[in-house]
Amino acid sequence: AEATVLLDAPGTQRASDITADGRTIIVENCVSPLVDCDVGAVSTDDPSGVEMLLASTHNEFAGTLSPGGEFLIYSTDEFGPRRLVIRPYPNVKDAFWQIPLNSCSRSDWHAEDEILAYCDDGRYAVTVSTMPDVSIGVPRLLHRPTRNTFTARYSARRQQFLSVRQLNVNNQAIVVTNWFDEVDRRLAARPGGQN
């Protein structure tokens, strides 16, 4: 299939999520990387521009939708150092709820009632109840990154975090294809097999 340009705007854009029907892409629109960022939506049916959902003097970035598409969570410096905020979607101005964590760069909805927060001091699970009203649970620490860990993603398939650590200092980039096949092979070769 041929690639289609959906957004050609000045600055830096990054797609952070897409609606379940594939008709709207949630984007981060920044003047430059991580500077003056806002969250918007682009229609795949009419990609003539970005509908800005969250545009202010604060940085808003890394917006993701709940599995049902009723809520948007994003990171912002509006309420403190990189706080996670949930808003109803698409009516983001109607209400908001803060996750009680600081220095969180992004989050993923793990399930309709739980988010995973990626913060500087660790990865947290936070229960989010949306019925009858929104309520936020107490964050539960799942994973604390070790020194030189620069990313960790949750694998729903494996129900565990995969961390990437910098082991070398000579600026080499190592690309691993078929990542899960490699992980399965290495785990099977360990004493005791897979765990």
Image (tube, helix red, strand yellow):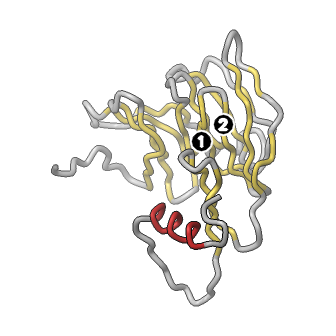
The disc labelled 2 sits on which kind of residue?
A: Ile
The residue at 28%/44% (across/down) is 6
Q: Mark 1 points at which residue?
A: 108
Q: Is mark 2 on a helix, strand or loop?
A: strand
Circle on res. 177 = none
Q: Mark 2 points at which residue?
A: 115
Q: Nearer the viewer, residue 35 or 61?
A: 61
Image side of residue 164 versus residue 97, left or right: left
In the image, residue 3 sits, relative to residue 194, either above or below, namely above
Residue 35 point in image, percent of width and height:
58, 55
Q: What element carries label 1?
A: strand
Q: Which of 49 and 67 is in front in this view?
A: 67
Mark positioned earlier in the residue sequence (1 or 2)? 1
* Rendered image quadrant of residue 143: bottom right
**Few, some or many C-alpha atoms within 10 Å of disc 1 (few <14, some 14-19, many ≥20)?**
many
Residue 175 point in image, percent of width and height:
44, 74
Residue 173 point in image, percent of width and height:
49, 80
**Residue contact at pointers 1 and 2, CB within 8 angstroms:** yes
Quadrant in which the C terminus appears: bottom right
